[in-house]
Image (cartoon, helix red, strand yellow):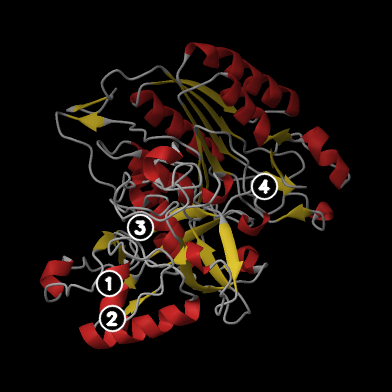
Amino acid sequence: MIPTGKQLPAGTERRLALVIGNKYYAYAGRLNNTHNDADDMAKVLQNLGFDVILKKDLSMIDFQKSIDDFGTKLGQYNVGLLYYSGHGIQYQGENYLVPIDAKPNTVEDIEYTCVKLGRAMAKMEGAKLKVSLAFLDACRNNPFPSSSRAVGQGLTIPNNPPGSFVVFSTRAGSTADDNSSGRNGLFTSALLQNLSQANVGLRTMIDNVIETVTQRSGNSQIPGRYDELRGDFYFLVGGESKPEQEKPIIINREEPSPISKRSKKLFPYEPEIVFVRGGTFNMGSNDDNLLAKPMHQVILSDYYIGKYEVTQEQWKAVMGNNPSEFKGCPTCPVNNVNWNDIQKYLQKLNALTGKIYRLPTEAEWEYAARGGSKSKGFIYSGGDDIENIAWWYGNSNHQTHPVGQKKPNELGIYDMTGSQAEWCNDWFDENYYKNSPSINPKGPNEGTHRIVRGASWRGLKDDSRVYYREVLPPNNTSYGVDYGLRIVLEH
């Protein structure tokens, strides 16, 4: 039953869940909590309006059949959910769910004795669902140690289709705690506690799960979230109250005061800033832009970032000059500046204001561009239609324009796509994404090139995607007309 005083969202579409718990493995380690996980998850999902298919201890044949039957039934539904608790492994870039009779004698046998996660995701994609969800408590140690050289730790980053939202019990490449002393696995326990929270969007709910698991594990287990969902999804609402604002994981626990209460009135040359609530997001992309690979999970603290790019009049008020190619437009973004020039500007700005302004880290820039905790998963910053949110090659008439004329993104920030490409603070290293710290990454300690983001007024559509990266030497003087800046205020 739906909890008293609560209801499913108005106009709720039909919901179907496939819930699987594998415990009694014939050739891999037996697991303690997977049946409990499946039973408890099935009960909660039924209370949330799902028709539930509950399966336990599936052999290879039964596993495949259950997924195929699930796929067939999905044609009558609009929301699909896969929950799995059991062994899972990665091999050659694919994630596999392990049947109870799996016994791969060689690593090459894995794809014939285990079930690809992609099989279930393809069924949901083929059903053209509004929302596809997958929660996997499957990132345990490799159950087949004899094949350990070719089988990676835990699961790998999934290639989930548009409209889907996948959550692993721990980040890609890591292993999870089965929580043998409790009724449920650590991840599933946190998930069960949060699923029935009314008026909480899916992204906020999962951020709360991530925070709970991270704290309970002493930072040794941080769930992985892989978000291709458009809009948001609510499992439950209550009364006539409106959905809560997003409240993702916050690294610094004290609520910052509004900027107007913390400092004097902004000087004319100070850029207006926007508060960004910290949170968890997937940085980069596994698509065709090699510099953006691999996608990886990042957790950020709260920060403040410029609502607009620094304008020509703001730069001139501090530096006494206007280096821009396109002069005569005080409210246009300053351009023709390199990373070294910007450091001199920041030094003078900080001396004038007594504050600490700096360039954003690349992670801060991308999180803000994606819309932070309010992200709707757009291709560009603020939308999928570049005409509405950016000055780019197709509409700029080959020149800059005053800031703030296009639509803002979800955080109320303007021009993070197009207008001027924006310098970030980070050095560039082609291997950094593979080894990046998950919490507040600041880039490599040294390098020869710095990061530039956001494309410019003459950028093409592919160059303007939120994850697209450029690299330039900090003293760059070539094509300087493309490059400007947006600043961060430390607090």
- Report which quarter residue 175 is drawn in: bottom right
Residue bearing mark 1 = 314
Asked whether 325 or 441 is in front, the reply is: 325
User: Reading the chain from its start, which is encountered first: label 4 or label 3?
Assistant: 3
What separation in Å lies between label 4 and label 2 (alpha carbons)? 41 Å
Location of residue 118 in the rendering, given as x and y in whole percent from the top left corner: 66, 33
Near mark 3 (Cα within 10 A), the count class, few <14, some 14-19 or many ≥20, is many
User: Reading the chain from its start, which is encountered first: label 4 or label 1?
Assistant: 4
- Report which quarter residue 293 is drawn in: bottom right
Question: Which numbered marker is on residue 249?
Answer: 3
Asked whether 99 or 214 is in front, the reply is: 214
Residue bearing mark 4 = 288
What separation in Å lies between label 3 and label 2 (alpha carbons)? 37 Å
Near mark 2 (Cα within 10 A), the count class, few <14, some 14-19 or many ≥20, is some
User: Reading the chain from its start, which is encountered first: label 4 or label 2?
Assistant: 4
Vertical order, 128 against 219 (above or below): above
Residue bearing mark 2 = 318
Vertical order, 397 against 321 (above or below): above
Of tags 4 and 2, the one toward the viewer is: 2
Left or right, 254 with respect to 226, comes to left
Tag 2 secondary structure: helix
What separation in Å lies between label 4 and label 1 (alpha carbons)? 37 Å
Near mark 4 (Cα within 10 A), the count class, few <14, some 14-19 or many ≥20, is few
Residue 299, can we see it?
A: no
Tag 3 secondary structure: loop
Which residue is the extreme one toward the bottom? 351
User: Looking at the picture, which amino acid does disc 1 mark?
Assistant: Gln
User: Reading the chain from its start, which is encountered first: label 3 or label 2?
Assistant: 3
User: Reading the chain from its start, which is encountered first: label 1 or label 3?
Assistant: 3
- For the point 69% across and 56% down, the residue is 153
Of tags 3 and 2, the one toward the viewer is: 2
